[in-house]
Amino acid sequence: MEQHERLLLENKAWAREEVLKDPDFFERLVNIQRPDFLWIGCSDSRVPPDKITQTKPGEIFIHRNVANLVIHTDLNLMSVLQYAVEVLEVKHVIVCGHYGCGGVKAAMTRHSFGIINKWLRNIKDVYRLHQQEVESLPSEEERLNKLIELNIQEQVLHLAETSIVQKSWKKFGRPHLHGWVYDLHDGIIKPISSMPPNSPLEHPIYEYDNLDD
């Protein structure tokens, strides 16, 4: 049996099990999608959002990319964010990275990795902003994990700097922004950053003044 064929068989087995447990399971999913959470996570296969949070289909709207970045010129991410905030009306947006992230580790080097250099450049900027704090730590692992945490915090700030989030904060008082980090060693998520609705930004230049237009 080919590897991909095993996935199809597992899918059929899962579908049968769900119907046996709850005959209306799929019918409910077809008719409505109203998750409370948008999850912006790393593409790493060891960090599946539904598994590590024990959530069911329909409970989390998910976007994943290398190193869980929030880049304002990434139309894919911005489209997901706008849909989640304006249409699904999510109450929480979570940026979740993980310790030992390969993308962050690569960004800490001077090695060229090809086209992904353009993506990792955003993490290098975080490193430059916090270089003294990162380099003050004694071991390579500690420096890596500190930059992972700082990168998550920076991405939460990037969310708050979007007109999408600011407009929803002003009109509806949502969503709450969170920065979390997942530890591969023990499976535990650690909260490291939080921005409730209408939190102050780092600099007023990022605050839009015409969101009623």
Image (spheres, rainbow, N blue to C red):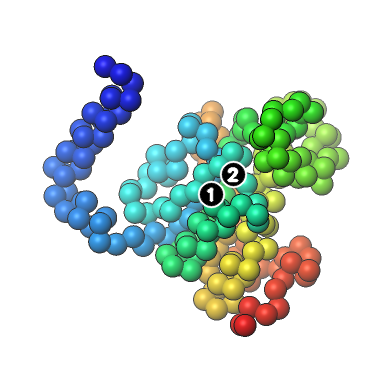
Residue 61's place in the image compared with 207, above or below, is above
Q: CA distance from mark 1 to mark 2?
A: 6 Å
Residue contact between numbered discs 1 and 2, judged by CB atoms under 8 Å? yes
The total number of labels drawn is 2
Percent position (x, y) of residue 183? 55, 34
Percent position (x, y) of residue 168? 55, 72
Q: Is residue 118 left or right of residue 9?
A: right
- The residue at the point 26 percent across, 34 percent down is 11
Amino acid carrying label 2: it is Asn
Percent position (x, y) of residue 132? 86, 40
**Residue that sits furthest to the top in the current view:** 1
Q: Is residue 100 left or right of residue 48?
A: right
Q: Secondary structure at mark 1?
A: strand
Can residue 190 be seen at all in this image of the molecule?
A: no
Can residue 76 be seen at all in this image of the molecule?
A: yes
- The residue at the point 61 percent across, 52 percent down is 74
* Circle 2 residue: 68
35 or 193, which is in the foreground?
35
At label 2, counting other C-alpha atoms closer than 10 Å, the crowd grade (few under 14, some 14-19, many 20 or more) is many
* Circle 1 residue: 40
